[in-house]
Image (spheres, rainbow, N blue to C red):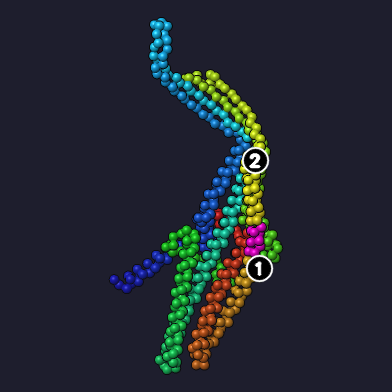
Amino acid sequence: MSRVVVLFLIMLSLTAGTFAQKVISLDEAIKIALQQNSGLLKSTERLKSNEASVKSAYGDFLPDLDVSGSFNWQRNEGIQSYDPNIGQFISADADSRSWRVSAGGGVVLFNGLANYANLSSAKNQLDAGKFSLIKLKQDIVYRTTEIYYSILAAEELLKVRNENVKYNQKLLETIEERNKLGSLPIADVYAQQVQLGNAQLQAINAENALDAAKNSLLDYLALDVFENYIYTDPFGEELPENMDGMMKDFGDYNSMLREAMSNRYDYKSSEKIHESRLNNLTISKSGLYPSLTGSYSLSTGASVPGDLFDTKTYSAGLSLRIPIFNNWNTENSIQASRVNVFEAEEDLRILKRGISIEIKQGYLDLSAAKKALEVSSKNVISAGENRKINNEKYSLGSGTILDVLQSDKDYQEALRNKIDSKYEFYKKRDNLLNALGKLNYNKFEN
């Protein structure tokens, strides 16, 4: 096989591998997460149960209706009867059949307002479920972006590590040549060989970290981890623009807290749960009041089906029940409902404190991330210039290999800090937006 054919086959296989890869943007990843997240799918299904409960609560106001039918057959054998014509007792058999159809039901006319409270409770539970579902969607958006940013950061770091391997490989070759010429000691060669080995280890670790980040996202999106995907960077290598303006958009703590109380769907859900607990307290108290129910029925019966409805019986009635003593069961139910109301109120207070802490800490974290990004960006410039100067001094013979190695380490550390700070800023920004209840999920569901 000629070299041209071999080269063509190699290029063809590489091209096929490239085309096999699928592109997943950040927006696409969020859309997939909102479609396939297991917790979201389960919560969506549970809403159907809440909707059925509301429908059932409405049904409690309506009269019910039952229809029943019966058929009975009876045979008596050896019945003794006196026959005056022959003047003696004779034995005979007899069959009897009966058919019966009835319809009827009842309606609750008053039960201490328990039916109204039950309807309100079911509606509040449904609203609470819907609000919780929205908050879950916002959390999914945030979690997806968080993992996606980790992939982008790992990709940038891998590029840096690979470039550092090339840099140290080239530097080692230069040192080895100068050593052969006798201008540098063999110790410098060994020192640079160790530096190159460390750079290669860092590149291996960076590649492994990138694979782990990709697997985390694919697992979160419920995608095949053996598929190859390309991840696009929506930001590029540039730093976030107008960070000061972004910080001003969040305002002061009090305004952010008011905004969160208005936007946070988990807080709205807790409020609805509290209202539902109050409704349940009303239901418990209904046991103290009289109840009034109505009943109605229509029935008919005959010995043969054709005679059904020849005779009919109608009935209607009212039933009043006045509770006198029920073994303190009503009192126990009321007390249990009061405890549930108290717990719901306490949950609201705890959640409000938690939201307040989230906002304050989230703003502090974002401010710190902004400062860290500004400092790390300047450090990259300084560390890069320092490495360049030490390389030039070493080339001229006025510097040491230790200065070169240390300046390279400082430069690599500065690059890593800049990458971490850049994506940490985006993560902290999204975290604060989520704490304020402002993460948009609607645009990813279209």
- Which circle's residue, 2 or 1, is located before the other in the chain? 1
Q: Is residue 84 above or below residue 104?
A: above
The crowd level at tag 1 (other Cα within 10 Å; few <14, some 14-19, many 20+) is some
According to the picture, the residue beneath numbered tag 1 turns out to be 247
- The secondary element bearing badge 1 is classed as helix
Classify 10 Å Cα crowding around label 2: few (below 14), some (14-19), many (20 and above): many
Question: 64 or 362, which is in the foreground?
Answer: 64
| 168 to the left or right of 257 | left
Residue 336 sits inside the magenta stretch = no
Going by the picture, which residue comes out furthest to the bottom? 182
Residue holding disc 2: 287
Mark 2 to mark 1 CA distance (whole Å): 56 Å
Residue 353 in the magenta stretch? The answer is yes
Which span of residues is magenta-colored?
Answer: 348-360
Which residue lies most toward the left here?
A: 1
> In terms of secondary structure, what is the magenta stretch mainly?
helix
Q: Could you say where residue 299 lies in the image, as x and y percent from the top left?
A: 55, 24
**Camera-nearest label, 2 or 1:** 2
Q: In the image, what residue occupies the spot 59% across and 23% down?
A: 314
Q: Amino acid at mark 1?
A: Met
Q: From the viewer's perspective, is residue 328 above or below residue 235?
A: above
Q: In the rendered image, which quarter contains the C terminus?
A: bottom right
Work out whether residue 166 can be spotted: no
Residue 43 spot, x, y in % from top left: 54, 52
Amino acid on which disc 2 is placed? Gly
